[in-house]
Image (spheres, grey):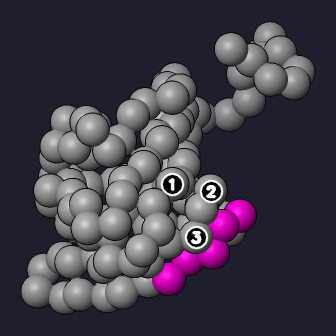
Amino acid sequence: MSADPVVTNPELYTVVFENDRVRVLRYRDRPGDATSPHGHPDSVMVTLSSFSRRLTAGGRQVELALEAGQARWVGAQEHAGQNVGDTESHAIFVELKEAPSGVRDGTPLGPDR
């Protein structure tokens, strides 16, 4: 996997939660902002605002328009991105880590810290 987005663009990505199973990132930018090349493991992205982005990787380029309130699967990938719209981008990424083998005894019910 390429560079960690929290390291390449700390002004745009922040860690809001992390444990041995997931890492949750908040992403926020303004129109015209761009990211350095970086990587993500398999993730779920939740859009908190509507925005337009251009993603670039390996000589390919795609433009996306996303609406607020969507939850999308994002397979592991490396890319650079740019806000090509006229609104701020605001999203949460839930990055998945290696799954444990089996159910853990003593796991509390409900949310844990």
Find disc 1 in the rendering and name its residue.
90
Find disc 3 in the rendering and name its residue.
50
Using the rendered view, name the quadrant where residue 36 is placed: bottom left
Q: Residue at position x 46%, y 60% from top?
A: 89
Q: Position of residue 17 (x, y in %)?
A: 53, 26
Q: Is residue 85 magenta?
A: no
From the viewer's perspective, is 61 left or right of 73?
A: left
The disc, 1 or 3, on the residue closer to the chain's N-terminal end is 3
Residue 22 visible within the image: yes
Give the vertical position of 92 relative to 52 (above or below). Answer: above
Q: Residue at position x 31%, y 88% from top?
A: 62
Find disc 2 in the rendering and name its residue.
48
Residues shaded magenta: 65-69
Q: Is residue 67 magenta?
A: yes
Mark 2 belongs to which amino acid? Leu
What secondary structure do most residues of the magenta stretch adopt?
A: loop
Label 2 sits on a secondary structure element that is loop
Say whether marks 1 and 2 touch (CB < 8 Å): yes
Residue 60: image tag = none
Mark 3 belongs to which amino acid? Ser
| 10 Å crowding of disc 1: few (<14), some (14-19), many (20+) | some
**Residue at the limit of the structure toward the left, as seen here:** 59
